Image: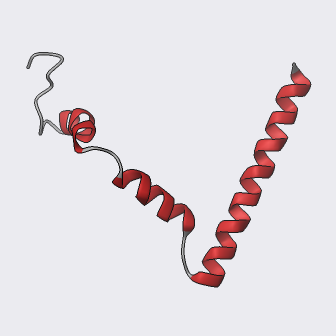
């Protein structure tokens, strides 16, 4: 089992290194930060109802329906 976990860790590290190199290459050649773009796209696709249920409740902007406030 140790050998499998060690192999998984090495593989994951190689994948992360390749992704970082691709990101740096895009940034240097096209002046575009691909990681930032991907993060922004994923944040744009979160529905407002989910944001209201999480962030809105914590900021006391939206009433928590589960606790019956």
Is residue 46 shown left or right of residue 55?
right
Above or below for 58 versus 32: above
User: Which residue sits at x=76%, y=43%?
Assistant: 12
Picture coordinates of residue 65 (x, y %)?
Answer: 14, 22
User: In front here: 56 or 29?
Assistant: 29
Residue 58: quarter of image: top left
Please state the total of marks drawn on the protein image. 0
Is residue 56 shown left or right of residue 7?
left
- What color scheme is it? secondary structure
Is residue 16 shown left or right of residue 68?
right
Residue 55: quarter of image: top left
User: Which residue sits at x=65%, y=81%?
Assistant: 28
Above or below for 42 versus 60: below
Q: Residue furthest right?
A: 3
Say which quadrant the N terminus sits in.
top right
Q: Residue furthest top?
A: 67
Is residue 50 shown left or right of residue 11?
left
Above or below for 26 versus 40: below
User: Which residue sits at x=8%, y=20%?
Assistant: 69
Picture coordinates of residue 43 (x, y %)?
Answer: 38, 52
User: Which residue sits at x=69%, y=62%?
Assistant: 20
Picture coordinates of residue 41 (x, y %)?
Answer: 42, 58
């Amino acid at each position: 089992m140790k050998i499998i976990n060690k192999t998984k860790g090495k593989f994951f590290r190689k994948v992360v290194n390749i992704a970082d190199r691709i990101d740096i290459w895009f940034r240097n050649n096209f002046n575009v930060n691909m990681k930032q773009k991907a993060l922004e796209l994923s944040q744009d696709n979160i529905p407002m109802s989910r944001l209201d249920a999480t962030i809105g409740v914590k900021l006391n902007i939206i009433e928590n329906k589960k606790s019956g406030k």
